[in-house]
Image (cartoon, helix red, strand yellow):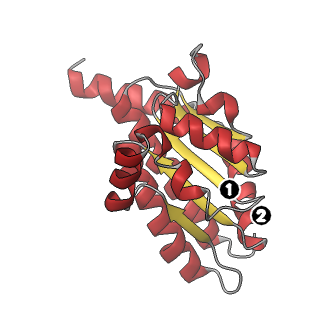
């Protein structure tokens, strides 16, 4: 088997191990936030940050176009480079999400963290803050976040989806598969 066939085989295997019940639980949490007019904050690093931005765009534009009444309120905390670098410079990189979220978030808002490893200190700090302030938390991570002895957003989240791979490309691909699935379900079921 050549390299590309092997990669596609690993990709397919990880896709087939996704648990639909975990995805439905996340869907329920997001729809509850929409109906209660709560805000969904989305965070990640690197490729996961790009996926966070992509998801918020799809949710606020695509899903909201299809939903007749109560709309999603969502914000990617990955997008303001001036804000992120100011916080990183004046405080620390570990605070880039907490310092953005703290003045905006309310009890029962949602924090969705997207990560391959799930162990980045800025994500951990944001999840600790969210949990301590009554927010719902969701983690979509690669397999290593479920098995590490380090603190991880996987262990801190109320809802979680495991992508059964440790390869960042496969994990990031399947992050978007899951996030697109959530958006498309809500577009096709606006009264859910």
Residue 143 vs residue 12: left or right? Answer: right
Alpha carbon of mark 2 to alpha carbon of mark 1: how far? 10 Å
Which residue is label 2 attached to? 32
Q: Could you say where residue 34 lies in the image, as x and y percent from the top left?
A: 71, 70
Q: Nearer the viewer, residue 181 or 136?
A: 136
Q: Nearer the viewer, residue 163 or 83?
A: 83
What residue appears at the point 71 percent right and 81 percent down from the top-left corner?
70
Residue 117 vs residue 136: left or right? Answer: left
In which quadrant is the C terminus drawn? bottom right
Q: For the residue carrying disc 1, how many other residues have a C-alpha within 10 Å: few (<14), some (14-19), or many (20+)?
A: many
- Above or below, 191 against 40 in this view is below
The answer to whether residue 22 is seen in the rendering is yes
Q: Which mark is residue 110?
A: 1
Task: Compare marks 2 and 1 and give the one earlier in the sequence.
Answer: 2
Q: Which mark is residue 20?
A: none
On the image, which quarter does residue 41 sit in?
bottom right
Name the residue at the bottom extreme.
68
In which quadrant is the N terminus drawn? top left
Front of the two marks 2 and 1: 1
What residue appears at the point 77 percent right and 72 percent down from the top-left corner?
35
What residue appears at the point 69 percent right and 50 percent down from the top-left corner?
26
- Above or below, 137 against 189 in this view is above
Q: Could you say where residue 116 lies in the image, as x and y percent from the top left?
A: 45, 32
Q: Could you say where residue 122 lies in the image, as x and y percent from the top left?
A: 49, 38
- Above or below, 163 against 188 in this view is above
Which element type, helix, strand or loop, lies under badge 2? helix
On the image, which quarter does residue 162 sit in?
top right
Callout 2–callout 1 Cβ contact below 8 Å: no
On the image, which quarter does residue 4 sit in?
top left
């Amino acid at each position: 088997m050549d390299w590309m066939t092997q990669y596609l085989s690993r990709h397919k295997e990880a896709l087939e191990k996704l648990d639909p019940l975990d995805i439905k639980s996340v869907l329920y949490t997001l729809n509850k936030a929409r109906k209660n007019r709560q805000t969904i904050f989305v965070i990640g690093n690197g490729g996961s940050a790009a996926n966070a931005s992509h998801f918020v765009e799809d949710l606020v534009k695509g899903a909201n176009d299809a939903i007749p009444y109560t709309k999603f309120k969502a914000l990617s905390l990955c997008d303001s480079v001036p804000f992120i670098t100011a916080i990183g410079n004046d405080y620390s990189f570990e605070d880039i999400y907490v310092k953005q979220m703290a003045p905006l978030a309310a009890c029962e808002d949602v924090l969705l963290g997207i990560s391959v490893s799930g162990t980045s200190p800025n994500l951990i700090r944001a999840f600790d803050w969210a949990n301590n302030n009554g927010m719902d938390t969701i983690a979509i991570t690669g397999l290593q976040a479920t098995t590490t002895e380090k603190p991880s957003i996987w262990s801190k989240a109320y809802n979680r989806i495991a992508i059964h791979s440790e390869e960042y490309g496969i994990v990031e691909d399947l992050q978007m598969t899951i996030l697109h699935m959530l958006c498309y379900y809500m577009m096709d079921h606006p009264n859910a």
